[in-house]
Image (cartoon, rainbow, N blue to C red):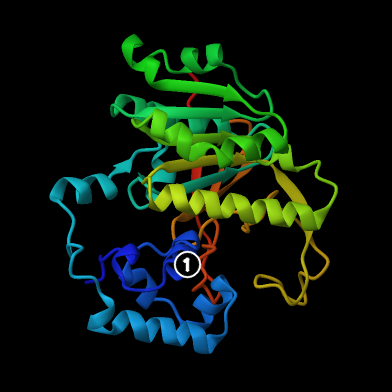
Amino acid sequence: MSSRPIFSLRLPKDTKDTLAHHGYSTLGELLSATPSSIALALGISVEDAEEIIQQVQRPATQNPSVPLTQSAAAVIKATRKFSTRWPPLDKLLDGGLMQGHILEVSGPPGSPKETIAIDIVTSFIEGGESVIFIDSQNMTSPTNLRDRLSGCPASSLRSLHYSSILNATEMMVFLHSINNILDSMPKVALLVLNSFSFPFSTLPNPFAKSGILEQVRQILARILIIRNLTVVVTSQLSNKMLQEDEPHGSPEEKGKVVMVPQLGTSYLPSGRSHRILLALDSPISGIMYLLPSSSPSTTTKEPVLHEPYSISIT
C-alpha cells in the first residue's frame, strides 16, 4: 500500500499536482509526514493538511483501476543506484546515487565537484544511459568531457549531449522546455547542471530570485517523479553569518561566518535531494559532508555525516 503512487488517489487533480511538485510521490511518503510539515510545504492550514491525510487513508479514496504494485522491471529501474566512483560518497549515499533523485555537490574553487559530476556521467554512460550535460560557467567543454570519458567506448559517447548556458534567462527557458527535450530524447536518464549557481548569482532582486528558484524546484520535482530522471548539480559556496535562532546556531556561534551552498535549499525538491559539501584539507584531500535533508518533515537537528576523501595522483 505504501508504494501506491500519489496520482492513483481519488483527490482533486490540483491537490495531487501540488503534492507531486513538493516531492511526494507515494502514499507512504505522504503518510509518514506530519500535518504541520505538509501544511508548511503546501502553504495550507494544519487542519487542511489533516483532512488530506484522512482522505488518503479512506479506501474510497484509492483508485482500484491503478495497480497496487509496479512490474518487477519498473521497480528495479526506479530503485537502481549508480556508483559515483568515489567510495566515500557512495558510502554517504548508502551505496550510490538512486535513479530519480537529485545530488547537489558544493565546494570551494579547487574542490573536485566537477570531477565527481563527470565520474557520475561515466557510470551512466557505461550503464547504457544517455546524459545531458549543461555547463554554466565555462568550467568544461565538449572536448574536455570526451577526454575525461576516454575510457568509455567511442560509440557510447554519442549518448552524451553537451550545452553551455551562461545566464539565468536562458537557464529558465531550458528548464521550462525540459519536458519537450526529454520527449525528443527518451533515453536520457541523467541531467547534469554544472556550476548551476553561477547564472543566478548576479540577480539583483532577492524577491525575484526567490520566485525563480521556486519555479526551479517545481520543475525539478516533476522530472524526478514523473520522468524518474536523475539530476546532479554542482554549486559554488558563499559566506553566511550564523544567527543564534538558526537550526545549527548557538550563542557561542552567533556572528560566526561559515561557507554554505550558494543557492540554499529552496530550489531542491523535498524527499529526493542529497546535499554534499566538500571541504578542502589540501589540493588532493578533504572531507565530504552530507548536509541535513531539506525534507519538509525535518523538524529536529540531524547529525552531519562525513567521510574523508583523497585524490589519487597517477
Name which residue type carries label 1. Asp
Is the residue 143 above or below the residue 172 in the image?
above
Give the residue furthest to the left.
72
Q: Kindly tell me whether residue 122 is visible in this rendering.
A: yes
- Circle 1 SS class: helix
Task: Tell me residue 282's x, y (percent).
Answer: 63, 35
For residue 224, above or below residue 177: below
Relative to 188, 144 lies left or right: right
Looking at the picture, does residue 213 appear above or below residue 156? Answer: below
Near-viewer residue (45 or 103)? 45
Is 11 on the left-hand or right-hand side of 128?
Answer: right
Q: Tell me what residue is drawn at x 33 percent, y 29 percent.
A: 129
Report the residue at 60% width, 49% height from top. Answer: 216
Name the residue rendered at 27%, 45% in the picture: 80
- Along the viewing direction, whichever of 183 and 220 lies nearer the viewer: 183
**Callout 1: 10 Å neighbours few (<14), some, many (20+)?**
few
Q: Which residue is mark 1?
A: 14
Query: Among all residues in the image, which is located at the extreme bottom?
Result: 47
> What is the quadrant of residue 280 in the picture?
top right
Residue 88 showing in the rendered view: no
